[in-house]
Image (tube, helix red, strand yellow):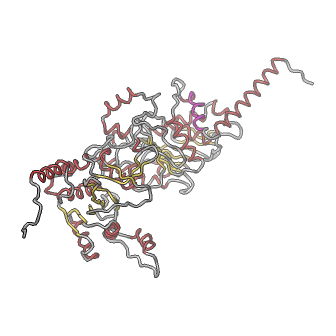
Amino acid sequence: MVVLTDRERLERLAVAVSELNRRETIREHASPGGLYRFIKYFWDVLEPQTKFVDGWVLQAICLHLEAVTEGRLKRLVINVPPGSMKSLIVNVFWPAWEWGPKQLGHIRYVSFSYGAWLTERDNAKFRDLVTSKKYQRLYGGPEGIKTTEAGKIKIGNSKTGWKFASSVGGVGTGERGNRILLDDPHNVADGESDLIRRDTVRWFRESMSNRLNDMQQDAIVVIMQRVHEEDVCGTILDDGLPYEFLVIPMEYDPGRHCSTSIGWSDPRSVDGELAWPERFPQEVVDSLKTTLGPYAYSGQYQQSPEPRGGGIFKRDWWVPHAVPLGTPLKLTFEYVVGSLDTAYTTKDENDPSAMTVWGLHYDHRGHPKILLLNAWEKRLEIHGQEVPRYIGEKHEDYIRRAQPSWGLVEWVIYTCRRFKVDRLIIESKAAGHSTAQEVRRLTHGHEWAVMLKDPKGEGDKVARAYAIQHLFSEGMICAPAEIDEHDNVIWREFADKVISQASRFPKGHDDLVDTMTQALRHFRESGLAIRREEQQAINDQEMAYPSKSGALYPG
């Protein structure tokens, strides 16, 4: 029997305790919420001189990346302010966590950014992390992660996994992976360059998005700050691509409260409450606003490429008309106007055709209110393909089946019939003339009046917008919305699109705004949208010159 000395017993005990601690750490890293604990544990490997600052923003990012790992999310967009550790989390810690605690060493990553030096910088940090003694002690060993290739451009491991660094339009476009990581596709300095931005968006659509090994099972993660309404995120939203959005503005905006499908919800409830006051206190945020200006701050820090509240048309001026989701409007309208801006083409580089529908009614005090009833933007040819109707097929089933084949004229007629339009206004240009002719021909000109409108004599777009601004500031313009239990306004999807585009005007995409100004000017010119002071003047005149009672020709 071997008799151990006290020193040997203590040494063995220390080894046993160390092994228990190692296994417990591995277990904690692999359990739900483990990515965040993993980052805190390995923080000193990459940032030995910088203190780790806790924050729920970091936890929110980690929770959504864990959902990607678990297969609950396949397409994820994360919009967070600069300084939120987005590159470190997505491009460094998360891949190392998947390779180590989650035992997914076979996963392959292709990482893109607007500049190759950024992804190469993060690859170098990733390499330093997975080759560190601290990481190897937990996740190395005979059956663990060993690097077989350790450059800045590509890091490979003994489990056939690798991580490749490239740039927008770079050589990595030819690689395929299980994870496509797009970290800051736009250079903030180039955010206002239409040419560069459009090239990046085209690359995202045509090259990057199909570089997965398995398009159904593998994942794409886009993490960025907003730089323009037509940036990659704007394209994802406009095209209705199936991405989950985690949006965290620096200052809380109740009108843009973010909740996601994994059960996460922005924990803030107070208007203007900061996302990470421990790292970005109020005085720092105020300084950023002054330095950057409203547009840059709104995009980069508020994740909305518009000044809060909007420009010519402020968000707060829109009056919510409370309608529960899925419930039809129960209003009788005196006059319904459809407004169309035509551009019949399916080419992405051209503007889409846009249509809005507006209904005028009077509130209990007899004041006019104009409600946005519907809106859409579509890239369409003037006519679609004819779809034969099946014998005995219900009308609603036929409509649902035929809609994907419709062209511009079919969509316009359907919209006008659905909302019982009284007048359809079409901007008078080449495409507008031919569209008006086709609508009249197919409806025999009996269902609603068709009016071609030439805006040339009414000033430029900004002048036309200012001409109807007072309708908003006086609370005459409404849109359908839900009001949640916290009294937050949640606009209907089509209404939010119009409100957002109007708030950004005159910057960016403005086809819906064109239809809006066209319709509202018509209400104004028709004498239906009367300003308060105008109504008061009419009332005063009626009081000063009251109508005489009795018959005009007595006896």
Q: What quarter of the picture does the N terminus occupy?
A: top right
- Residue 38, magenta (yes or no): yes
Q: Residue furthest right?
A: 1
Q: Quadrant of residue 299?
A: top left
Q: Is residue 228 above or below residue 1?
A: below
Camera sees residue 313: yes
Q: Quadrant of residue 344?
A: bottom left
Start and end of the magenta stretch? Answer: 34-44
Q: Position of residue 184 (x, y in %)?
A: 43, 42
Majority secondary structure in the magenta region: helix
Q: Is residue 203 visible?
A: no
Residue drawn 32% across and 45% down? Answer: 315
Rendered location of residue 353, percent (x, y): 30, 61
Number of numbered discs on residues = 0
Does the segment drawn in magenta span residue 370? no
Q: Residue furthest front?
A: 555
At 32% across and 40% down in the image, what residue appears? 307
